[in-house]
Image (cartoon, helix red, strand yellow):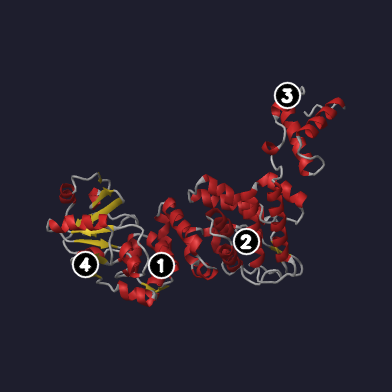
Amino acid sequence: MNLPEHVLECIETLENAGFAAYAVGGCVRDACLGRPPQDFDLCTSARPREMEALFSHKDLVLAGEKHGTVGVITAHGVVEITTFRWDGGYGDHRHPDWVKFVGDVEQDLARRDFTINAMAYSPKRGFADPFGGRKDLERRVLRAVGDPARRFQEDALRILRGARFGVKYGLTVERATWDAMIAQAGLMDNLARERVFDELCKLLPLVSAGDLVALAPILAAVIPELGPMIGFDQHSPHHAYDLFTHTAMVTAGVPGDLALRWAALLHDIGKAPTFTRDETGRGHFYGHAQAGSEMADQVLRRLKAPTALRERAVELIYRHMTHLEPDKKLLRRWLSRLGWETLESLLYLQEADMGGKGVDVPGEQRVFSKIRELLEEIRRENACLSLKDLAVNGHDLMALGLQGKAVGAALQTLLDQVLEEKLPNERQTLLDYVREQICQGEDFT
């Protein structure tokens, strides 16, 4: 395993002082997979005060000192170095009640979550892999260290981390580990919502439809609103799949943009509560887009999602049933109302929604390519789509005698006329139109 110079320097400083030191965890796992590590964590037999003395010539981060962690600031970032330790009980299923410093790397590795993360490497001492992490990587297996139930009782976030590791590295979760993940899923209620949201945001861009279907019980444990969707028969000739399978296909079918993936995951969350069946037995979901947008807003607020992401995802859900047509005039109006980013995201969501039905409807998919062609034409035309694009502004209209709210109303009228292609976006033409309206008694209030 090749370690960068700044990491080797930290290890050598510890080893030259008589302490054992190893690179540990994710950087070792990634190196075994042939992936370049993103960051480097070290573990050592040195105690925090001993590390402080050894690295006194460096700037240090001491926020984690009571748990044995000292951050050494280098020119290439912070290297976190943690004393070999053993964790006490986890009363809140999140944090150790106490930590005990130990002198042996194997004891330290025994407290870690999965075997693939319980490996350490020292240029001097070689690999430490007491739980078979390298072999599990070769077999493409995700396995908890020791008793799986205990690992997840200690920190329930490990359940979501396990789901992410399985997806990211193409690993099959070992049966006992999977059973414990499902059995202990309720403990995730004890987690800070920000931690849950952060893990879900790492997971969502990676998943395939099959991944989401397999992970349905875990996702429903942290987003209970997804639970009723699992196995839900839509009783519709337009849908070949149950509601959650359809949702999984839509989520995997949109680009990896986070707001768009969240919108896809939650786009039909309002269907189960609005479900009705007519006299023929066919299912209907009247108002599910509005109901779903309100539910999604509550979910994302509960998870403490950033406001911008939440608002964008909720708007996409609210509008995902909007009928978009390959008509330039209508598309310009939608662009004026929503903007390029939202309209293009809505198009992706609707296209994936259509493709996730499992029922081929001739001509429906061709509509999307036609709409995109027209959008490209509009982009090339540099079309006037908003008030700021108009060839006139408020000062121009005030010079014609308009004041107050009449100025804004007149600008909006001009934009409507341009969007409808009734007027060209030319300064003199727009000013002449306003003069004419004023002469005819229009006060734009």
Whether the residues at callouts 4 and 3 have beta carbons within 8 Å, the answer is no
Q: How far across and down, in percent of the image, does residue 179 sit?
A: 41, 72
Q: Is residue 89 visible?
A: no
Residue positioned 71% across, 53% down in the render? 377
Q: Identify the mark nearer the N-term, 4 or 1.
A: 4
Q: Residues within 10 Å of mark 1 (few under 14, many from 20)?
A: many
Give the label, 4 or 1, closer to the camera.
4
How much space separates mark 3 and mark 2, taking CA atoms? 53 Å
Tell me the CA gap for discs 1 and 3. Answer: 67 Å
Q: As displayed, is residue 149 above or below residue 445?
A: below
Residue 327 quadrant = bottom right
Question: The N terminus is located in which quarter?
Answer: bottom left
State the SS at label 2.
Answer: helix
Which marked residue is nearer to the observer: mark 4 or mark 3? Answer: 3
- Residue 272, label in figure: 2
Give the farthest residue toward the left.
18
Q: Amino acid at mark 2?
A: Ala
Q: Is residue 266 visible?
A: yes
Residue 310's tag is none
> Residue 11, how many percent across, how many down?
21, 58
Q: Which residue is mark 4?
A: 106
Which tag, 1 or 3, sits closer to the chain's start? 1
Mark 2 closeness class: few <14, some 14–19, many ≥20 residues within 10 Å: many
**Residue sitting nearer the eye, 164 or 121:** 121
Can you identify the residue that label 3 sits on? 398
> Which marked residue is nearer to the observer: mark 2 or mark 1?
1
Label 2 or label 1, whichever comes before in sequence order? 1
Q: Residue at x 71, y 45 (%)?
A: 383
Q: Quadrant of residue 397?
A: top right
User: Please, what is the three-letter code of the amino acid marked with disc 4?
Assistant: Glu
Residue, disc 1 = 181
